Every structure is written in structure tokens, then in C-alpha cells.
Amino acid sequence: MDIQSLNPPIDLITNFQSLQTDVQEDTSGEKTRRLVTYLKEAETKSIAMKLHTLDYEEKEFARLLHEAFGASSRIVLAAWQKAHGAELDV
């Protein structure tokens, strides 16, 4: 199973380090949209990994990744929406 494809671009890694501040200061939603797009793409890739392996442990790991990326995208969106009092179109 190739989990390297789930690595975020280097500039998104810096957003993870200051996520709370970035979400609060991101009034346009551009940074948050980009982060959520990455998380959703990683969620899709992880479910594809699950479908392409026969090993039970790898399937379970991919399932957990899928759930984690999905939850992360929902949390980031909820944080942005709470900080700005509006929904963010992604």
C-alpha cells in the first residue's frame, strides 16, 4: 500500500502548524478551501487503497485513514464556519 501519495504539498504543511490562526484569518476562505480539498482527495485515495489490497490489516488501516481524513475535513470546515459565521463553498 502506497501511503506516500497521501502526503500533503509542503506549503500545506505550514498551514497545519498554525491551523487555528490560519482559519481565523482566512476571511476569503481560500486557504481553508485548499486544505479541505487536500483532505477530501486524501480521503478518496485512502478508500481506493482499501479496495486495492487483499491484506486485512492494510484494509483496516486504509479504512481508518478514510475516516480520519473525512473527519478532518468536516472539522476544518466547521471551524471556518464558526469563525466567520458563514458557510464555505468547497
Image: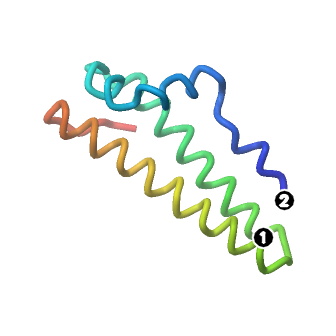
Q: Are marks 2 and 1 in contact (CB under 8 Å)?
A: yes
Rendered image quadrant of residue 62: bottom right
Residue extending farthest to the front is 17
| Residue at the disc numbered 2 | 1
Name the residue that disc number 1 marks: 58
Could you tell whether 48 is left or right of 35 in the image? right
Q: Is residue 73 left or right of residue 9?
A: left
Residue at image coords 69%, 53%: 45
Which mark sits nearer the N-terminus, 2 or 1? 2
Q: Residues within 10 Å of mark 1 (few under 14, many from 20)?
A: some
For residue 12, above or below residue 6: above
Residue furthest bottom in the image: 56
Residue at the location (68% across, 58% down)?
Answer: 46
Rendered location of residue 19, percent (x, y): 40, 30
Residue 25 at what x, y percent from top left? 28, 19
Q: Quadrant of residue 48?
A: bottom right
Q: Neighbour class for label 2 at 10 Å: few (<14), some, many (≥20)?
A: some
Name the residue located 73 percent from the left edge and 68 percent from the top edge. 50
Element under disc 1: helix
Quarter in which the C terminus is drawn:
top left
Above or below: residue 54 compared with residue 43: below
Quarter in which the N terminus is drawn: bottom right
* Residue occupying image coordinates x 76% and y 43%: 5
Residue that extends furthest to the left in the rendered view of this protein: 85
In this figure, what is the number of numbered marks? Answer: 2
Q: Position of residue 36 (x, y in %)?
A: 46, 39
Task: Using the image as rendered, state which of residue 67 and residue 44 is in the foreground.
Answer: 67
Q: Could you give the CA–CA distance between mark 2 and mark 1, rounded to whole angstroms?
A: 7 Å
The quadrant holding residue 65 is: bottom right
Please tell me which residue lies in front, 48 or 67.
67
**Amino acid type indicated by mark 1:** Glu
Helix, strand or loop for disc 2: loop
